[in-house]
């Protein structure tokens, strides 16, 4: 298959970009790929909403910028923060024009929620299912574009570069180029190549490398691992954000259900089993301190009390208002026997968001030519050492727009590449048993949770590194002799992603933002970024 624009991912980043290039270039073809169903994305599960300065009477760009910089703990790129906050408003208006609906007051103004680290109420939301609403609007708009071809159940294996046509590509190769991708078509179980002139990587996050995560099963770090294999630049991988309040259930299959931070924005309080709040011991902003601080406080409380969770107290909140704003959470809690008006909700931190990723410039351009990145897989400089709540959907829309502008400028000078060889599967046979893969996934999740979680130290990181090395060797040996499958490729990508997190964590000899190492409890004076 040949296409002008190739988009990998059907979350907010991929769909926003695809829609824009398709509308701006009606004579050009756009192919969008997703490894499962088109709406199975992190985007679909976003609850709290999207941050934006919509109420200029009380809020301002400078306040949103300041809040983002404070959360990022000294590592944000201030130019990028400025760009995202200011251009974000136009992008919000744009998705509204495409059909997304955000809750409004009777007078027509937006209902604006508040979340940790925000000095003002500025979160637009659609009840507690904002992401689902945005994904719906985008998928419907996409359906109206005749030049877009969306292919589900198509697993991208690798980015094609000069390496695949016989050249040596290293990290210092100046002009590594992307010519498209190899994919495993899950409809036919065949490996195909898709040749593209310009590619956008929008593969989302990596929460699945931890045992407990809010991320659905697609979040296995595939994009970052592919770019790393293609010798592209990756940065800031040590900054994994743990959401403080995932619903604690003793047996969870897949991913944990999130209790949005907006619930604390409405006045819910974190407490112990006696209903006594503890956040004031940790931060003057109490329950609405930035996420890294709240997650560490909960982790500490759980360790002190020897428990696997703390509680969220919503009993004092107005029940009717709660049901109106958080109907999904209300129903989910009821379904597991919790009446939020009478019972405390058991909650625990869960891996939630990857602040680092594929390094881009201010136009979404990666270090590989003709390859752009947007959304959670990208590291644009916005989040620094800790993402401010609800800045992620905003960043994805701003950077997909900027990548679109840059792509349209570039497309006519970018011919597509001929003579790309077929995928070489010589010497591989069907897998004999899946246990080798599933057990390694379990081991990986355990070691990342136990050694590379909210609180780290040098010894734990060294252990993680040694265990990962063994998993890496075993998995590479299996990969060399086995026909590829999504399970095997995801394991491989998860190991690479975990390696990048551990390596970055080892390189950072300080504690900053989401990276807390008890051997270096203080910030260093050097604010260097780690670039692998
Ligand atoms: P995703 O939406 O995750 O999409 C990734 C796409 O890439 C999928 O289509 C997937 O199939 C595809 N893909 C991945 N690998 C491959 C491969 N190998 N081959 C083919 N396709 C592939 N952020 C906010 O700003 N506000 C919120 O309120 C908020 N709430 C959240 C709540 C939850 C429970 C979660 C999990 C996250 C939340 N976030 C929130 C974060 C935010 O939702 C995500 O960061 C954002 O949606 C990521 O969008 P994306 O387009 O980058 O990736
Ligand atoms: C939430 O709703 O608490 C999640 C918001 C986010 O991750 O930005």
Image (cartoon, rainbow, N blue to C red):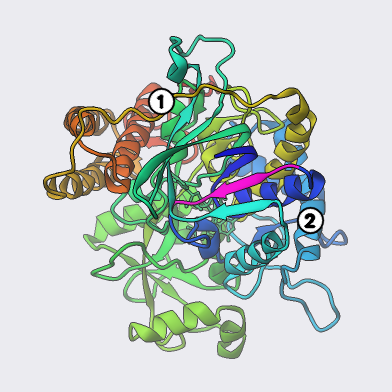
Relative to residue 485, is residue 512 depicted above or below? above
Looking at the picture, how far across and down is residue 436, in whole percent?
Answer: 14, 44
Tell me: 54 left or right of 342. Answer: right
On the rendered image, what quadrant is the C terminus found in?
top left
Q: Residue at x 57, y 71 (%)?
A: 129
Choose between 72 and 359: the one closer to the eye. 359
Q: Residue at label 2?
A: 53
* Residue 489 falls within the magenta-colored stretch: no
Task: Please tell me which residue lies in front, 434 or 106.
Answer: 434
Residue 229's tag is 1
Which dot, 2 or 1, sits closer to the camera?
Answer: 1
Question: In this picture, is 66 found above or below 528?
Answer: below
The numbered mark at residue 321 is none
Question: Residue 171, percent across and down?
Answer: 47, 14
Magenta span of residues: 28-35
Q: Residue at the spot x=59%, y=90% of the render?
A: 320
Find residue 392 and report its horizontal and vertical position in percent: 60, 50
Mark 1 neighbour class, 10 Å CA radius: few under 14, some 14 to 19, many 20 or more: some
Q: Quadrant of the N terminus?
A: top right
Q: Quadrant of ligand 2?
A: bottom right
Residue 125 x/y as whole percent: 66, 68
């Amino acid at each position: 298959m040949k296409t002008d624009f190739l988009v990998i991912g059907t979350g907010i980043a991929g769909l926003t970009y695809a829609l824009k290039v398709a509308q701006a270039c009606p004579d050009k073809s756009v192919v969008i790929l997703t490894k499962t169903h088109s709406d199975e994305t992190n985007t679909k599960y976003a609850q709290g909403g999207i941050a934006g300065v919509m109420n200029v009477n009380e809020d301002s760009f400078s306040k949103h910028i300041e809040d983002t910089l404070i959360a990022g703990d000294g590592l944000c790129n201030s130019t990028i923060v400025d760009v995202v906050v200011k251009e974000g408003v136009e992008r919000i208006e744009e998705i509204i024009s495409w059909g997304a609906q955000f809750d409004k007051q009777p007078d027509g103004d937006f209902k604006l929620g508040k979340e940790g680290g925000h000095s003002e109420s500025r979160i637009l939301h659609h009840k507690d299912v904002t992401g689902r609403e945005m994904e719906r609007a985008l998928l419907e708009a996409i359906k109206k574009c005749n030049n877009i071809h969306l292919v589900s159940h198509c697993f991208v294996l690798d980015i094609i570069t000069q390496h695949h046509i016989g050249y040596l590509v290293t990290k210092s190769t100046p002009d590594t180029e992307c010519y498209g991708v190899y994919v495993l078509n899950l409809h036919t179980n065949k490996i195909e190549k898709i040749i593209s002139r310009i590619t956008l990587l929008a593969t989302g996050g990596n929460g699945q490398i931890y045992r407990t995560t809010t991320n659905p099963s697609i979040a296995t770090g595939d994009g970052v691992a592919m770019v790393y294999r293609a010798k592209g630049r990756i940065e800031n991988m040590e900054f994994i954000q743990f959401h403080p309040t995932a619903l604690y259930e003793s047996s969870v299959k897949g991913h944990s259900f999130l209790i949005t931070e907006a619930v604390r924005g409405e006045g819910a309080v974190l407490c112990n089993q006696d209903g006594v709040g503890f956040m004031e011991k940790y931060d003057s902003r109490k329950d609405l301190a930035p996420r890294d601080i709240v997650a560490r406080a909960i982790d500490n409380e759980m360790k002190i009390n020897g428990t696997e969770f703390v509680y969220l107290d919503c009993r004092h909140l107005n029940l009717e208002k709660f049901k109106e704003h958080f109907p999904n959470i209300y129903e989910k809690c009821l379904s597991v026997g919790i009446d939020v008006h009478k019972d405390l909700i058991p909650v625990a931190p869960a891996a939630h968001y990857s602040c680092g990723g594929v390094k881009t410039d201010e136009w979404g351009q990666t270090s590989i030519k003709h390859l752009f990145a947007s959304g959670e897989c990208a590291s644009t400089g916005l989040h620094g050492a800790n993402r401010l709540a609800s800045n992620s959907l905003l960043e994805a829309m701003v950077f997909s727009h900027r990548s679109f502008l840059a792509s349209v400028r570039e497309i006519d000078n970018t011919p597509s590449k001929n003579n790309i060889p077929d995928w070489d599967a010589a010497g591989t046979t069907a897998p004999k048993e899946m246990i080798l893969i599933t057990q390694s996934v379990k081991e990986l999740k355990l070691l990342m949770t136990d050694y590379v979680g909210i609180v780290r130290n040098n010894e734990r990181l060294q252990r993680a590194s040694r265990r990962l090395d063994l998993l890496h060797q075993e998995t590479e040996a299996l990969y060399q002799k086995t026909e590829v499958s999504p399970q095997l490729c995801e394991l491989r990508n998860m190991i690479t992603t975990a390696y990048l997190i551990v390596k970055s964590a080892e390189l950072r000899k300080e504690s900053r933002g989401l990276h807390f190492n008890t051997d270096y409890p203080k910030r260093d004076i050097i604010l260097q970024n780690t670039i692998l």
